[in-house]
Image: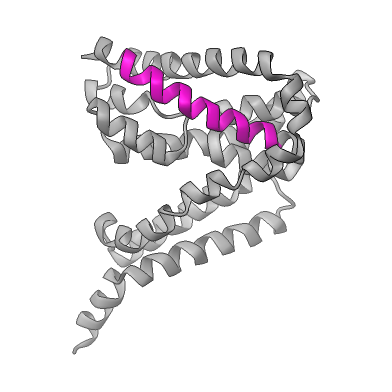
Amino acid sequence: MNTDAALSVIRTSPLTGVFVTLLAYKLAVLFNRRCKGHPLSNPVLIGVLLLLVWLLATGTSYRDYMKGGVMVQMLLGPATVALAVPLYGNLSRLKRAAGPLAITIGFGGLVGIVSAVGVGWLLQLPQQVLLSLTTRAVTTPIAMSVSQGIGGIPELSAMFVILSGIFGAVIVKPLFNLLGLRDDMVLGTATGISAHGIGTARVFQLSETAGAFAGLAMGLNGVVTAILVPLLAPLLH
C-alpha cells in the first residue's frame, strides 16, 4: 500500500473521526482554562474551529468525518439525561418556581421560533432553510428529528443549533452583567431556552443552580418546540 492510499484509509476511518473530535475538544478546554474562562474561548467554539481547520487541511469530507463523528453524536442523548442530577439537587426550588417557569418556557419557546423565522423571512431565505431555522433553539437530536419531519434539512438545523448555542454561551454573562441581573434562576432559564446544551454547559461553570435551571429549561423547551413547530410549519409551506 502506497503512502497516499494509507493516508486515505486513515483519514476515512471511523476511529479517526472519534479521535480528532475528542482531541480538538480537549485542546479547546485547555485553551479555555489558559484564557481563564473568557467567553470568546468557549470550548465548543474553539473545538469547532480546530475541527474545521483539520477537515480543510486534510481534505476530509463531512461524510467521511461523520463515520466516526456519529459515535460521539450518539452521546448527546445520555449527556442530556444526565442533567437530571443537578435538577434533583435543586428540586425544592424548582417546585416553588413551577408556575413562572412554565409560562416563561412556553412563551420563550414560541418567541424563539417566531423570531428565528422572522429574521430568515426578512432575509428572503428559501422555504426549506426557514423550516430548518424553526428548531435552532433546542438540542441537536431534537432539532434534527423535528426538522426532518417538517421538510427541513437536518444537517442545516444542526448547524443553526450549534451557532445559536455558541453565540448564547459567549454573550450570556456579559449581557446579564450589562443588564444588572444577578439571579441564577433567571440566568439559567434564559440560557436554557435560547442556547440549549452549549449555553447550559457555560452557566454550569458560573453556578450549579443556574446550570440546573438551564437544564430544565432546555429540556422543556425541547418538548414545547417539538409540539409547536409541526403545528406552525404548514404556515411556511
Left or right, 199 with reference to 127: right
Dominant secondary structure, magenta: helix
Q: Which x, y percent locates residue 15?
A: 37, 71
Residue 78 magenta-drawn? no
Judge whether 78 appears above or below 25 on screen: above
Residue drawn at x 73%, y 24% as measured from the top left: 95
Way the structure is coloured: one colour
For the N terminus, the image quarter is: bottom left
Left or right, 154 with reference to 226: left
Q: Which x, y percent locates residue 9?
A: 25, 77
Q: How many marks?
A: 0
Residue drawn at x 72%, y 34% as measured from the top left: 210
Judge whether 21 appears above or below 185 on screen: below
Q: Residue furthest top?
A: 235
Residue 213 magenta-drawn? yes
Residue drawn at x 22%, y 80% as measured from the top left: 4
On the image, which quarter does residue 57 sit in?
A: bottom left
For the C terminus, the image quarter is: top left
Q: Which residues are magenta?
A: 211-232
Query: In terms of depth relative to the viewer, which is nearer, 41 or 205?
Result: 205
Judge whether 233 appears above or below 29 on screen: above
Q: Which x, y percent locates residue 13?
A: 30, 72
Query: In terms of depth relative to the viewer, which is nearer, 230 or 169?
Result: 230
Residue drawn at x 47%, y 58% as measured from the top left: 50
